[in-house]
Amino acid sequence: MRVTVDRTRCQGHALCVMNAPDLFDLDDEGRAGVLADPVPRDLGTAAREATGGCPEQAIAIEPR
Ligand code: F3S
């Protein structure tokens, strides 16, 4: 699976970083970036939690 962040939607709430710190980080502009592509198998649950937890619906999952 892959995760992507729509930077035009991201408002820097950082819930993704709390839910999946191995997958997301905030850049200098306070917007989320993806650290692992593709998502390692053992981080799939965290990726889904981060996606569902983003209040701006800025994260998308692409199955692969
Ligand atoms: Fe941005 Fe959503 Fe994370 S707004 S910082 S992608 S929780």
Image: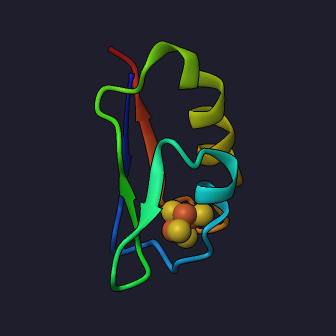
Q: Quadrant of ligand 1?
A: bottom right
Q: Is residue 26 left or right of residue 43?
A: left
Q: Is residue 51 above or below residue 25?
A: above
Q: Nearer the viewer, residue 26 or 12?
A: 26
Q: Position of residue 17 (x, y in %)?
A: 59, 58
Q: Residue furthest front?
A: 22
Q: Is residue 46 above or below residue 35?
A: above
Where, by quadrant of the figure, is residue 29 drawn?
bottom left
Q: Position of residue 53 (x, y in %)?
A: 70, 53
Q: Position of residue 25 (x, y in %)?
A: 45, 60
Q: Is residue 36 left or right of residue 52?
A: left
Q: How many marks?
A: 0
Q: Is residue 27 above or below residue 24?
A: below
Q: Residue at x 60, y 69 (%)?
A: 14
Q: If the image is split into quadrants, where does the N terminus sit? A: top left
Q: Nearer the viewer, residue 24 or 6?
A: 24
Q: Is residue 49 left or right of residue 64?
A: right
Q: Residue at x 43, y 81 (%)?
A: 30
Where, by quadrant of the figure, is residue 38 drawn?
top left
State how the image is colored. Answer: rainbow
Where, by quadrant of the figure, is residue 32 drawn?
bottom left
Q: Residue at x 62, y 75 (%)?
A: 13
Q: If the image is split into quadrants, where does the C terminus sit? A: top left
Q: Position of residue 33 (x, y in %)?
A: 36, 59
Q: Residue at x 33, y 83 (%)?
A: 28
Q: Residue furthest bottom?
A: 29
